């Protein structure tokens, strides 16, 4: 969903409850990105997203996600199923993951289990995951706090939700041309998506139900000298339904009293994305260095978007997004180092022909990643401990051109930086490997309020002395912390 950024929003606070009526549109995309390398996110506002889909096992994510010139044996088969041909043998894996948002913003836990199988020139894989999402918790202590600048998150009412994920892959390698072809399907049954409750800040209940399908066909061509080229075709379909209930209060002149009435609203969201991903890597002589380049193109349409309770209407839209990047990496002995630099141009616009107004976005984003890794032998070379650390910054810069009913052009700019710091450790012995990953995302926030206390006067009805005199709607800075424990057992 796309919408103008930096539009202020207001809220109404009483001593009975905290209720928000947002006037800004926050983009929660990508709402479904289980394997995000070939799906480019389009964000129009610095809204924090929970790490709901960051549960897939990875060998390089602790290095900031460096991936252009550095292979990731655990994650690559999910990105390009043909890369599973590089696995020397099958294995079982599990990667329990846990994430949480600061300021009681919610969180979730996911338990995936799966296996890679290989027989001769054929290979395949399957995985399943069960997920539970915890809603944000209301914290009204800030309303009564002595701190004159108390801040609190808006916590719309929501319940725990569960999701299920299934993954399947099948491929074959042709020895003479060193060519591998494979296809995969990633299906999700979604009972909730993190952050959707922010669309309905004054709701009494929210029920979500939907599914998503990610289809991929991959190719991997390798030459002598460790050179390779890959291509991936991807098609992603996301569909979600929101059933929301509200309680409206109104004045009944007959009984001269305030009465309540239940109101129900049904919303739906549909997103279709098709894309192409190309990448090439090769070593630099015998120096231990590798270089790589990639190109990714996405075309996304949103025929249906949820209206929420926002006061600013949103329209269906379409976007074209691209990634053009280069990377260098060095693996020598027990040390590894990598750097990626990616330029991300995006064009997005509304497509509602019933409105004269027209909104156009132009993004010029930059993604930089860097990571290091060092292994240490323990007792014998068969037992080793590896430490990793990395950082990623996504610099988002957007320009919004709005053409109103009088054909007047209003242009605005917006920019922010999203940081991800990560580190990890792994222990390997024989056919068994165990990994730990910690990462924290910052630079974004969630809707909230700030109360300023003063002498004299009060906001709304004076019930308690020292009631807040000023209430300001703000974006509260949030950081998202993720921990993952991965276990890999190689088959004999």
Image: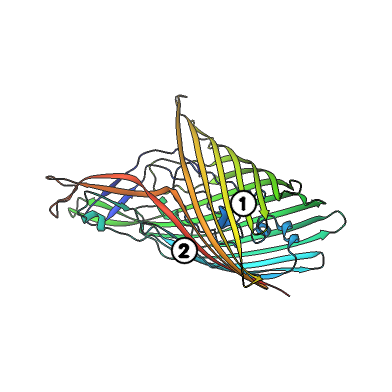
The mark that comes first in sequence, 2 or 1, is 2
Q: Which class describes the residues within 10 Å of circle 1: few (<14), some (14-19), or many (20+)?
A: many
Task: Judge whether residue 350 can be spotted in this image.
Answer: no
- Residue 141 position, x and y percent, is 25, 58
Is 210 located above or below residue 343 in the figure?
Answer: below
Q: Which residue is mark 1?
A: 337
Q: Which residue is mark 2?
A: 108
Left or right: residue 225 compared with residue 110: right
- Residue 189 position, x and y percent, is 56, 63
Q: Secondary structure at mark 2?
A: strand
- Residue 461 position, x and y percent, is 16, 50
Viewer-proximal residue among 350 and 470: 470
Tell me the mark number nearer the camera, choosing from 2 and 1. Answer: 1
Taking the view exactly as shown, the residue that stands out farthest to the front is 379
Left or right: residue 12 compared with residue 435: left
3D distance between C-alphas at marks 2 and 1: 31 Å
Taking the view exactly as shown, the residue that stands out farthest to the right is 176
Q: Are marks 2 and 1 in contact (CB under 8 Å)?
A: no
């Amino acid at each position: 969903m796309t919408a103008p950024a930096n539009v202020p929003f207001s809220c109404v606070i009483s001593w009975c409850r905290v209720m928000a009526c947002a006037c800004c549109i926050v983009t929660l995309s990508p709402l479904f990105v289980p394997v995000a390398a070939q799906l480019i996110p389009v964000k129009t506002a610095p809204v924090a997203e929970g790490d709901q889909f960051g549960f897939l096992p990875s060998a390089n994510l602790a290095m900031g996600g460096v991936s252009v010139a550095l292979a990731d044996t655990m994650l690559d088969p999910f990105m390009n199923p043909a890369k599973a041909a590089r696995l020397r043998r099958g294995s079982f894996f599990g990667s329990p993951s846990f994430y949480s948002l600061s300021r009681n913003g919610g969180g979730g836990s996911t338990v995936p289990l799966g296996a890679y199988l290989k027989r001769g020139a054929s290979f395949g894989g399957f995985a399943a995951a069960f997920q539970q999402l915890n809603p944000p918790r209301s914290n009204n202590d800030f309303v009564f706090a002595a701190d004159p600048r108390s801040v609190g998150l808006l916590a719309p009412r929501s319940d725990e939700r569960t999701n299920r994920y299934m993954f399947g892959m099948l491929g074959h390698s042709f020895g003479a041309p060193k060519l591998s072809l494979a296809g995969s399907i990633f299906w999700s049954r979604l009972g909730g998506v993190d952050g959707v409750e922010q669309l309905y800040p004054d709701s009494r209940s929210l029920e979500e139900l939907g599914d998503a399908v990610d289809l991929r066909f991959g190719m991997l061509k390798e030459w002598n000298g460790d050179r390779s080229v890959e291509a991936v075709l991807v098609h992603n379909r996301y569909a979600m339904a929101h059933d929301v209930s509200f309680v409206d209060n109104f004045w009944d002149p007959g009984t001269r009293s305030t009465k309540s009435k239940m109101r129900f609203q049904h919303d739906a969201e549909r997103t279709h994305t098709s894309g192409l991903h190309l990448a090439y890597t090769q070593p630099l002589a015998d120096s231990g260095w590798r270089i790589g380049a990639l190109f990714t193109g996405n075309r996304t349409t949103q025929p249906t978007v949820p209206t929420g309770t926002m006061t600013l209407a949103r329209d269906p839209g379409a976007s074209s997004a691209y990634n053009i990047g280069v990377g260098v990496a060095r693996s020598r002995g027990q040390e590894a180092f990598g750097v990626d630099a990616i330029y991300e141009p995006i064009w997005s616009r509304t497509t509602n022909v019933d409105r004269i107004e027209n909104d156009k976005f132009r993004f010029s984003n930059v993604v930089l990643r860097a990571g290091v890794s060092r292994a240490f032998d323990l007792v014998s070379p068969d037992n080793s401990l590896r430490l990793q650390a990395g950082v990623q910054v996504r610099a988002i810069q957007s320009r919004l051109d709005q053409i109103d009913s009088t054909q007047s052009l209003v242009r605005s700019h917006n920019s922010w930086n999203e940081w991800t710091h990560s580190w990890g450790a792994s222990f390997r012995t024989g056919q068994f490997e165990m990994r730990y990953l910690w990462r924290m995302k910052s630079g974004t926030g969630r809707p909230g309020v700030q109360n300023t206390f003063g002498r004299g006067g009060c906001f709304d009805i004076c019930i308690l002395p020292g009631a807040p005199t000023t209430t300001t709607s703000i974006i509260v800075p949030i950081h998202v912390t993720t921990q993952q424990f991965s276990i890999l057992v190689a088959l004999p």
